[in-house]
Amino acid sequence: MSSGISTDPVIWLSAEDVAADFSLPPGTAPAGRQSLATARMVIFVGLTGSGKSATVDALAQGGAVRAVLPDRRAVTDRIILPAMTGDPARRVSDRIERFRLTAAFRDAHPGGMGDVLERLTVDQTTARERLAGGWLVFDGVRGPAETAAAARLPNAVFAVLVAPPEVRVARLSLRGDPFDRASLAAGEPLEESGGASDYLRVLREHEVGTLMSEATMGRLARLLAEADADLTAVASAAAIVVEESRYYDTSEAIAVLKDLAPGRTVIVDTADTPVAEVVAAISARLSRAG
């Protein structure tokens, strides 16, 4: 059996390379384009801060995949948000507003991003000359509704990355990604920190206690204080993780995949697992798939 490792350079597709036509049935494509519904695809499942981006990068560098599709953020900008705002030129940067708009899209299209994947197409020449013969990567889907729709992709393998909320808040607070922005209450005093108590106050104000115990929240506050995390970044991270939890549940997504695609799912806890080991677990599953 082939190891699945390729020496060819990995192709990174842009949002402009893909489209989804909701007037057509799933798995079909307009003239000149090809559906990706039957492609061999690695679909990442996980919440913000679960380690998906780092794992996708490492998986691509390791040669286990042929191409990386535009990620959830790019596909949302390209397909979902214009459908909900009616304005393709409008950019929605606030994460909280994006959650609400994607939830509204899911009301209209119950599979959410899963429904998009069922209809995702690329140019036929691109499919034939650039994507044939290897695994494609998509980052990613969330929650049971999206995984249920995505599980209808017959050749997809699902890489579920899980991490507890305190780990995800810490990662978002410290990674410095400008995309991790959320609307905060006007006048919040976030310019300077006087120690762990200030971080704890911010975590409480953003209802992080709904996701973890007071003791865990205290440990998180001390970790952020020791790292000298920016308080505004912490507030945004807390708001994002809490808001996301209102729309998506990874444990329910796992239950769906165990029911609908048990032989095509690998689950990795990334909290204490190095990226190289996460990639090894996923690569092993792809090798078994042939």
Image: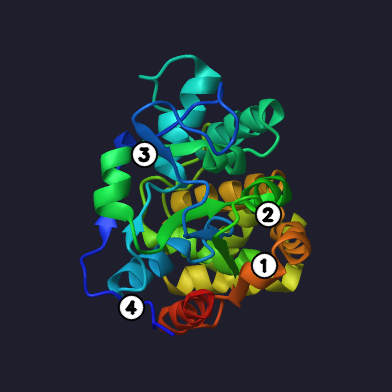
State the scheme by which the image is colored. Answer: rainbow
Structural crowding at the residue carrying mark 3, measured as other residues with C-alpha within 10 Å and reported as few (<14), some (14–19) or many (≥20): many
Three-letter amino acid code of the residue under disc 4: Ile
**CA distance separating discs 2 and 3:** 45 Å
Mark earlier in primary sequence (1, 2): 2
Up-down relation of residue 94 to residue 209 (above or below): above
**CA distance separating discs 1 and 4:** 42 Å
| Helix, strand or loop under label 4 | loop
Circles 1, 2 touching at the beta carbon (< 8 Å) = yes
Q: Is residue 193 visible?
A: no
Given this view, does label 3 or label 1 mark the residue nearer the observer?
3
Up-down relation of residue 147 to residue 15 (above or below): below
Which label is found at residue 122? Answer: 3
Q: Residue 139, percent across and down?
A: 47, 54
Three-letter amino acid code of the residue under disc 2: Arg
Circles 2, 4 touching at the beta carbon (< 8 Å) = no
Structural crowding at the residue carrying mark 1, measured as other residues with C-alpha within 10 Å and reported as few (<14), some (14–19) or many (≥20): many
Which label is found at residue 217? Answer: 1
Mark earlier in primary sequence (1, 4): 4
Three-letter amino acid code of the residue under disc 3: Val
| Residue at 50 percent of width and 68 percent of height | 224
| Residue at 35 percent of width and 62 percent of height | 133
* Residue placed under numbered mark 2 in the picture: 204
Which label is found at residue 5? Answer: 4
Judging depth in this view, the residue of 38 and 99 nearest the camera is 38
